[in-house]
Image (spheres, rainbow, N blue to C red):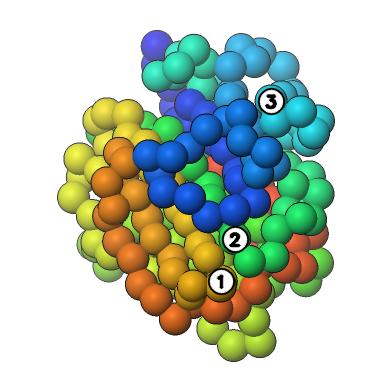
Amino acid sequence: MNIRSQIIWGTILVFGFYLPAFGLDASDTGLVGWWKFDDESGLVAEDSSGYGNHGMADSANWCEGIIDGALGFDGKSSVLISPWVFSRIEKEITIAFWQYGKVDAQPVAGTILQATTDNYKKVILCHVPWKENDVSNIIWECGNTQHEIDCIFDSADSNAYEGKWNHWAFVKNVNSGQMKIYLNSALWDSFGGKISMITGITECHIGATRGLG
């Protein structure tokens, strides 16, 4: 299938708590959002968490994924998600997803998920990868603060984001100050001292950056 997109997500889950990638369980009561992207057609990306926070797809392409279907994104297309997903989240979060990057399109400045306040101040940003000055970084930003947003990042080899399906999990625990990134269930990056709260989210997009300039 010819998919004109840089990145494809097969499924994405958001948990209102911090847990290691190898412990992911969609039946856990901490689950607040789960978009399988296996709807195959239409404008609705169904939320399988039971909360009914269905996403609205804007120009994304339905395609084959690692688990049933997937969505293809071109950097401009996205899925709009209700901010209610984050209403019960303040101190702990896990965002997990499958990602496949097309070899002939990567690396790019790609956004997995963006969540912002009502004045488009970023609270959550996941980039896999983010290419700048010929360096491709995996970037995890999370927290609503008056100063710099909590962030961890590191450069990545191409096999981490292109040519095959990879499973990523981005996690934060304000209580411990830990932010971590897991790749295929193995710890890929971590840092401490990250204590800004995860609050104030009024808009969320999967697949593209909106309003940040």
Query: Dot 3: within a 10 Å radius of its alpha carbon, few (fewer than 14), some, or many (20 or more) residues?
Result: some
Q: Residue at x 55, y 42 (%)?
A: 207
Residue 10 can be seen in this image: yes
Inspect the image, locate mark 1, and give the three-letter code of the amino acid beneath it: Val
| Left/right of residue 85 with respect to residue 15 in the rendered view | right
x and y percent of residue 204 in the render? 70, 51
Q: Separation of disc 3 and disc 2 at Cα? A: 21 Å
The answer for how far apart the CA atoms under marks 1 and 3 are is 27 Å
Residue 83, image x and y in percent? 78, 51
SS of the residue under disc 3 = loop
At x 34%, y 49%, the residue is 182
Please provide percent x and percent y for residue 149. 55, 77
Image: 147 above or below 78 = below
Marks 1 & 3, CB-CB < 8 Å contact:
no
Q: Residues within 10 Å of mark 2 (few under 14, many from 20)?
A: many
Q: Is residue 165 left or right of residue 126?
A: left
The residue indicated by pointer 1 is: 174
* Depicted 134 relative to depicted 9: above or below: below
- Which amino acid, mark 3? Ser
Q: Cβ–Cβ below 8 Å for labels 1 and 2? A: yes
Residue on which the image places disc 2: 92
> Nearer the observer, disc 1 or disc 3?
1
In this view, the residue in front, 120 or 51, is 51
Quadrant where the N terminus lies?
A: top left
Which sits in the foreground, 97 or 176?
A: 176
